Amino acid sequence: MAQIVMEGLGKIYDDGTRAVGDVNLEIGDGEFLVLVGPSGCGKSTVLRMIAGLEDITEGTMSIGDRVINDVAPKDRDIAMVFQNYALYPHMTVRDNMAFGLKLRKMKKEEIDRRVNEAAEILEITDFLERRPRALSGGQRQRVAMGRAIVREPAAYLMDEPLSNLDAKLRVQMRAELERLHTRLGTTTVYVTHDQVEAMTLGDRVAVLRAVSDNRPFNLQQVGPPAELYASPDNLFVAGFIGSPPMNLTYGHLESENGSVFAKLPNTRLKIDQAALDHHPGLESHTGQELVVGLRPSALEAAVVGGSDPERSMMATVDVTEMLGADTYIHFTVDRAPVVTPDIEELLADTGQSASSLGDTTNFIARVSPDVQVRHGDNVELVVDTSKLHFFDKTSGERIGAK
Amino acid sequence: MSLPNLLIHPGHPDFLDLPWDESVSDWEHDRIVEMPAGVHRHPVVFVAYDEGVYVVKELPHHFAQNEYSVLTELENRTYRSAPPVGLVHRGWVDDSEEHSAAVITQYVTHTFPYRRLIAGIGFGKRRARLLDSVAGLLVELHLAGCYWGDCSLSNLLYRYDGGAIEAVMIDAETSYLRETLSDGQRLEDLEVMKMNLAGEMADIAAEKGVGIDQADLRLGEDVEATYLALWEELNADLIITRDEGFRIRERIARLNDLGFSVDDVELDPTDEGNLVQMRVHVGNRKFNSDRLRQLTGLAAKENQARLLLGDLSYFLAKNGYASDAHRAVGVFAWLSGVYEPIVSQIRTVWPGDDPVQGYCDFLHHRMRLATERGFDVENDEALSSWMESGFPGFD
Ligand SMILES: Nc1ncnc2c1ncn2[C@@H]1O[C@H](COP(=O)(O)OP(=O)(O)O)[C@@H](O)[C@H]1O
Ligand SMILES: Nc1ncnc2c1ncn2[C@@H]1O[C@H](COP(=O)(O)OP(=O)(O)O)[C@@H](O)[C@H]1O
Ligand SMILES: [Mg+2]
Ligand SMILES: [Mg+2]
């Protein structure tokens, strides 16, 4: 087991494409780290540099306490999981897992120990002396995984391992991977473009973004899922993490009788002291136009009888989506959508463009399933103002340190 | 019946008469023919048309698309991969489903699967040729910028090529192409190959009822050693002195002999005034087959071509056609007086399916007779002897 450290890591491909710039990242021993970001942001390139498939053109990569820039893939002590999982029909499950070790001339007792242990973890002990034919699809996949496990590598690398599975199997395999990681405790680097997958699997999540001329680095933010969700460092992370995504609109701060208010298209919200404490330095932006973010979960339908207008916004229901545990209320606010370079990049990833957005902004509120509203109803939504997010509208950077 | 999206290379049938709305494993159709197939994961069927026999392999769209595009691009870079013919996409099936897509390739003729190569007696001799063929193919793919990612005995087809065995790549699901591969990519491809070969050899042992310990697990390592030696030979930078121009010619001749054409030779001065660094850029491994085609119009595999060219040179020298001025006449004399009459006889009596290989087997026999006797043997006599001895080949 080992930690993986990247310092000033960069990659320029032979054709001159800069795929990776200035990645500084420490992956702890035993940690499950997910690299996530839109397609083309450099995730696979970073992973393939760890694996030794792509030459490192800048910076250093270490595994354990060894710099591995020039070490051959097989000597890096890592395993790419889910590569090809041919199972050999005439061999027992045991031999299917063991032959690779035999090839490496390992002693029989050690091979037996490792195979038995892996089988235990994978819950296939009862099948060890059977042939693959006798196994179900899922069990076969475990045997294939067993082949990687018996190597006892310092780290596992996985590049979108579940992307070719159908939705149901994907959820099942995700749970299986989680369970395995808990049992094995081996450092794992996992690549996905699916932020839901990233948030459910990762001990920590690193959000990457394609490099550009004025931003020659990929890494946007690294942290535990809850931290990325609660305190995104910029609009890119804010817009990428979370489903449904964070509601964003323009607004500005006003100060009146010692209180601070956020003026938004549909409302004027009082920012209480707790929220101000949460965003040190926020007040110095009073009067400037900012981007204000509000997660759907920070909005709740008011109970009948009205509440404090300084803490709520009125909405005319467009559509309601009932999902069982939650209900989503879709509504619009009277202001053209926020468009910044960060947002444009995220739109491009889903095949949209800023010009097609229209002149109102769609918002979503995640409310209790008890709320019964329909298209055209007016509803008062209470805002948890301690959960407002503020961003600089030019740079996209978060305003107020955590 | 729903019709899929079909992308078909020109010059082939449109395949529209096949029952595309069913999964390939359920197909029952007049076009389907039985052919020997190796171990495989995906459903595969062989279908016969006037244009020839084709292979339909069903697999998830993502893999199908990758395989099709790699094979298509490889066709322009090497000559040792299955010729792609079509990509089939059944838009009404989820793309991750096994039967969402299919790749059609041309059936590679005159080939046999690895089990026939390894099974039975005499694998000892064939083993060395197997090493050469797998290592040679990997070198060639790597020179062409192709990372295979799944080199195994069952992802190759084999055919006799003169005294050698030629390996043809058929399964490119996991492959990708680059301008040039990194060392890491090449080495990792070798790791995959070693693991796959060990698994296949262990499986053969298990099938025979013997333990892994008895399996030929070293096969992959031996392929690797062969690969590394060949790679070194092709890519080594040699330092020569200014007056050693002959070493450049020597090196080119050696590479040509191995079948590689040399695109250009790069000579760079070194800090030491009198020394020059030489590096060669090698092209395809079809130097001899290209040359044979140029001289005679005959199509042959690389090693067959080398043997045929040897026979041709011998004929030209012996009959006084060696000078440039007489060569064209001599080539014609060889074709019409030697090669064609013998090949047409071979066609009528030889049990094999590739007459050029029959001619090579005959040449080999002629050589063996001459060595035994210590003097040249005439073609007529050698041919009758070869036929009477039951058409011995190279084994
Ligand atoms: N072999 C290559 N040669 C040149 N550019 C490449 C190569 N591979 C990837 N790229 C480019 O590098 C960037 C990052 O790619 P990649 O690491 O595959 O991203 P991701 O895995 O996040 O989709 C992209 O712009 C991509 O086009
Ligand atoms: N172009 C071809 N010519 C002849 N036989 C082929 C061809 N393509 C595939 N086959 C046969 O089908 C088998 C399976 O093909 P392969 O591409 O390896 O499928 P899989 O992905 O299922 O392993 C091979 O072992 C071979 O016998
Ligand atoms: Mg990728
Ligand atoms: Mg195959």
Image (cartoon, coloured by chain):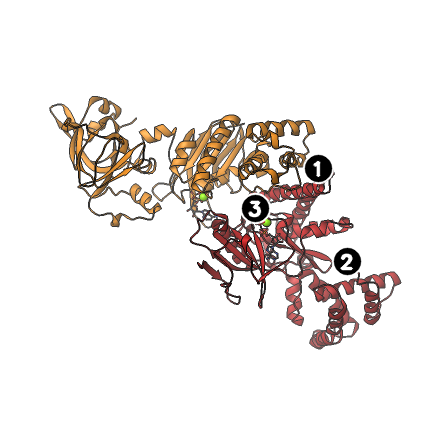
The chain identifier of the residue carrying mark 1 reads B
Instruction: From the top left corner, tell me how far across and down residue A54 is, in percent.
Output: 51, 43
- Residue B196 visible in the displayed image: yes
Marks 1 and 3: same chain? yes
Dot 1: element? helix
Q: Is residue B360 above or below residue B177?
A: below
Q: Is residue B364 left or right of residue A93?
A: right
Kind of residue indicated by mark 1: Ile
Q: Label 1 vs label 3: CA separation?
A: 24 Å
Which residue in the protein does label 3 denote? B149
Q: Give the class, few, some or many, for how many residues have Cα within 10 Å of label 1's Cα (few <14, many ≥20).
A: many
Q: Nearer the viewer, residue A185 or A382?
A: A382
Quadrant hosting residue B327: bottom right
Q: Is residue A334 left or right of residue A78?
A: left
Question: In the picture, which chain is red?
Answer: B
Residue found at the very far right of the displayed protein: B373
Q: Give the class, few, some or many, for how many residues have Cα within 10 Å of label 3's Cα (few <14, many ≥20).
A: many
Which residue in the protein does label 2 denote? B394
Tell me, for residue B212, which label it has, or none. Answer: 1
The chain identifier of the residue carrying mark 2 reads B
